[in-house]
Image (spheres, grey):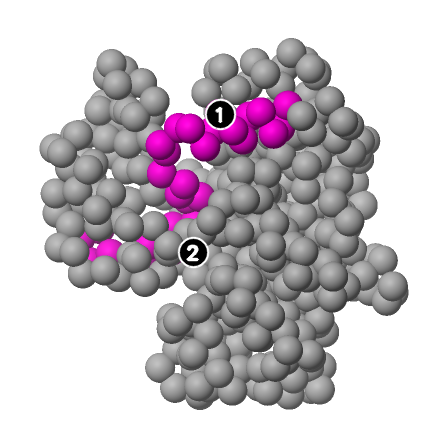
Amino acid sequence: MENWIQKMPKLGFGMMRLPQNEGTIDLDKVCNMVDSYMEHGLNYFDTAYVYHGGMSEVAIKEALVKRYSREDFYIATKLPAWEMKEQADCDRIFEEQLDRTGTDYFDFYLLHSLEDGNNYETYEKYNCFEWAMKKKEEGKIRHFGFSYHGSPELLIKVLDKHPEVEFVQIQLNYADWDNPVVQSGKLYQILHEREIPIIVMEPVKGGTLANMEPKLENMMKAVNPKRTIASWALRFVGSLEGIMTILSGMSTEEQMLDNLQTFTQFQPLNGEEYKVVASVVKEMQDMPLIPCTGCRYCVDGCPSGILIPDIFRAVNTKRLYPMDARPGMFYRNMTANSGKASDCISCGQCEDVCPQHLPIIELIREASEKFD
């Protein structure tokens, strides 16, 4: 195994869901979380050009780059296909990212959300793989890869065409292992068989595997009452071979502390726990919930200003608990200052960027019927 892979921490700090205060990133809390994370000997920070409307990269500069020696941490960020109109955009975006983060190189650089269709075609159209190799030769990129939301067939095609790729980031969790859309298990097998280092995103599926229906949580607590529900999801992924780093998009200091405890005292799932996970997945598959991970890619370009992931949270809660009035209250409070589901004009922008390939327009109509 190459030396750089051995140095990678098992837990990575995903900076897509940072704590906020009145709509802006709460930098004081982020600094505290960065400090706790670094104090435990961990040092991988994952951001992207589009996270928090570009402010996640700025938070990296303020909470990390300005406060720690550059050689003590790794920064990973990403090039977004949907922000590109010409090949010159590669350099434009890259230089903007260097400025935002206050650094002169990135340890890990990814093509963002490579998938079947527009994103992959854009990366090939503008020769982004070759461009990245040039940046690597210049010392501006140390390691190159891509984050992936496409089919197993396309993954094989891309890996065959681009052996220069050093690592791949995939969505992987026990709920999506056999998901016919995400196909986490198949993607993992392809990468593992080729001995390509894997970075995992969405191990807790946008938080949905941390807060589940009481019946499912009780199944886990009956076997291991001291473990948090989120830790089961992280331990499932951490028990797999070939996983280089597991990203967790931590929004609170409490989540940070729980994850640190999981990984500093890491214990793989045992046989009984695997059986419980299998039973939980079976129960979940019988529940018709919207599998939204809350990445919020759909929000930035919505012409009606609809907070789609938040509306889906309300829909899921209403599906699980039809008599509960709280989803309606949550929806009304949320849409007081944003677009309502009925404001959707069916433009399809949201569906074009959704990594989960959800039929968002149809689901938003359901939300409108339930809440408007």
The residue where tag 1 is placed is 283
318 shown above or below 102: above
Which mark, by number, is residue 49?
A: none
Between 366 and 8, the one nearer to me in the picture: 366
Residue 290 is inside the magenta segment: yes
* Image side of residue 38 versus residue 2, left or right: left
Seen at 49% across and 41% down, the residue is: 206
Callout 1: helix, strand or loop? helix
Of residues 357 and 332, the one nearer the viewer is 357
**Nearer to the camera, 206 or 362:** 362
Nearer to me, 21 or 162: 162
Q: Is residue 229 left or right of residue 321?
A: right
Q: Position of residue 113 (x, y in %)?
A: 49, 63
Under mark 2, the amino acid is Pro
First-in-chain label (1 vs 2): 1
Q: Secondary structure at mark 2?
A: loop
Percent position (x, y) of residue 49?
48, 65
Q: Amino acid at mark 1?
A: Glu
- Nearest to viewer (mark 1 / mark 2): 1
